[in-house]
Image (cartoon, grey):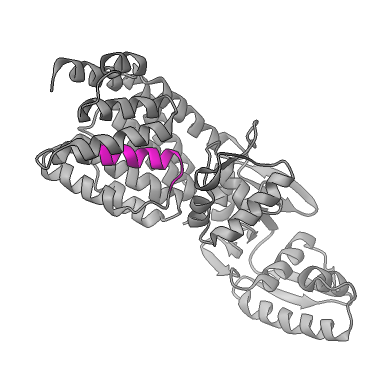
């Protein structure tokens, strides 16, 4: 490694992007291309950065496997930042294995953190935890320790472990300040806002209020009868009844919970569950069938009683019935939840994260764009979607795939 390449690498390590470019801006050899690519990524020109890194990878010879693997890792980081989540993970896996076999523990750990962050974004929490478990942050430099702590915090928020998330974010903040990289400090500060933003709405006895992550955690651990509108389930303490595959039953359960301790008229239930304008005898018969199914499923937690006018909940061993609802229940709310992180997403990445078809996501984005709730940049396959500023002030943790209250 010549002196200019070494100086550029040191400048990048401390966040001096322009200083690094001054050393290698006019060079076209593979190491210089790689450093220029990383520098351009730091400046936000991701397309140019990817082109430079791909050129560098092609330029390294067969004996320079480590350098080529580092380029693959850097390109994978660009893909993560640009939410290009559909890229095959095999290339990053192979690059990480190459780096580990050649003793480059630092860059191998960085590749592992990228793998964990991608898995976290698409809701594969168990795999993210397994990846993170194989990484020891102790010998890593401060910047890598901050990245490790950020992934730990992200997993803790998804698991509704608020205390662990706050501790991890505090560790990330200390490591980021020690590293002296302003962008990393800003990323940690942005992540910390999640715990102080509304995560859900609590609806009870005709009233509603916003809840923080800690409050949601406390609620689900209590003996309160909760109709969970995030994962379409009914919960109390450690018992849960899933209604995710039974949308009509969930609508009925939520209607009864919101009306508790009163009842809900049959006509109102028919209108909400079946979207019928008029409750004729056939709809009333169907309502009785569905209520029988709901009564059977909820038997461990509550009864469903018929009243003179309709139906009502009769919770067992619970003094309160509440609905845990999304902060914003607009149409296409899950798409908005992803875009609320302030990053630009492709429709393919959103489809992967939401486990749905890309065409469904595109229709949702077009509808949101027509309503002025999202905007797009670029054309064709490079088009990216984001929310116009200011970004919605609510945490998306509970809206994303993989939410698990434990």
Residue 223 visible here: no
Where is residue 20 drawn, in percent x and y?
30, 17
Q: Quadrant of the N terminus?
A: top left
Query: Residue 24 versus residue 110: which sits nearer the camera?
Result: 24
Looking at the image, residue 318 sits to the left or right of residue 66; the answer is right
Up-down: is 32 above or below 195?
above
Task: Answer whether residue 306 is magenta in the image.
Answer: no
Count of numbered labels shown in the rendering: 0
Up-down: is 30 above or below 117?
above
Up-down: is 87 above or below 37?
below
Task: Please give the range of residues in magenta.
Answer: 71-84
Query: Residue 388 versus residue 219: which sits nearer the camera?
Result: 388
Q: Main secondary structure of the magenta part?
A: helix
Looking at the image, residue 282 sits to the left or right of residue 123; the answer is right
Q: Quadrant of residue 30?
A: top left
Q: Residue at 65% across / 56% down in the picture? A: 363
Q: Quadrant of residue 319?
A: bottom right
Query: Residue 297 versus residue 366: which sits nearer the camera?
Result: 366
Q: Residue at 73% across / 63% down in the picture? A: 257
Q: Residue at 82% across / 64% down in the picture? A: 262
Where is residue 350 drawn, in percent x and y?
52, 51
Task: Answer whether residue 79 is magenta in the image.
Answer: yes
């Amino acid at each position: 490694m010549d002196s200019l390449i070494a100086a550029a690498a040191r400048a990048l390590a401390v966040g001096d992007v322009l200083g690094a470019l001054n050393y290698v801006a006019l060079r076209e050899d593979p190491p210089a291309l790689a450093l220029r690519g990383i520098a351009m990524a730091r400046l936000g020109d991701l397309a140019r950065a990817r082109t430079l890194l791909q050129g560098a990878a092609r330029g390294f010879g067969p004996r320079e496997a480590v350098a080529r693997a580092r380029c693959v890792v850097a390109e994978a980081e660009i893909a993560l930042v640009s939410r290009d989540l559909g890229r095959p993970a095999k290339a990053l896996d192979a690059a990480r294995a190459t780096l580990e076999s050649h003793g480059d523990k630092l860059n191998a750990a960085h590749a592992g953190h990228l793998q964990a962050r991608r898995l976290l974004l698409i809701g594969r929490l168990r795999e993210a935890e397994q990846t993170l478990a194989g990484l020891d942050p102790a010998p890593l430099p401060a910047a890598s320790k901050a990245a490790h702590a950020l992934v730990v915090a992200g997993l803790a928020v998804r698991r509704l472990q608020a205390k662990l998330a706050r501790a991890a974010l505090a560790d990330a903040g200390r490591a980021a300040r020690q590293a002296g990289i302003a962008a990393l400090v800003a990323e940690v500060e942005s992540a910390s806002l999640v715990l102080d933003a509304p995560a859900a709405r609590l609806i009870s006895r005709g009233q509603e209020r916003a809840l923080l992550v800690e409050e949601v955690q406390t609620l689900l651990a209590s003996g309160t009868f909760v109709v969970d509108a995030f994962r379409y389930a009914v919960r109390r303490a450690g018992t849960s009844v899933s209604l995710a595959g039974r949308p009509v039953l969930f609508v009925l359960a939520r209607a009864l919970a919101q009306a508790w301790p009163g009842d809900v008229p049959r006509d109102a239930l028919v209108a909400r569950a079946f979207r019928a304008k008029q409750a004729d005898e056939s709809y009333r018969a169907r309502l009785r069938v569905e209520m029988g199914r709901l009564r059977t499923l909820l038997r461990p937690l509550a009864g469903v009683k018929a009243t003179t006018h309709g139906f009502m909940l009769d919770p067992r061993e619970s003094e309160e019935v509440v609905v845990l609802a999304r902060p914003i229940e607009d149409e296409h709310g899950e798409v908005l939840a992803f875009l609320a992180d302030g990053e630009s997403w492709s429709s393919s990445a959103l489809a992967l994260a939401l486990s749905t078809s890309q065409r469904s996501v595109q229709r949702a984005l077009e509808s949101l764009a027509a309503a002025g709730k999202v905007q797009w940049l670029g054309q064709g396959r490079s088009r990216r979607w984001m929310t116009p500023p200011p970004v919605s002030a609510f945490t998306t943790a509970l809206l994303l795939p993989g939410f698990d209250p434990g």
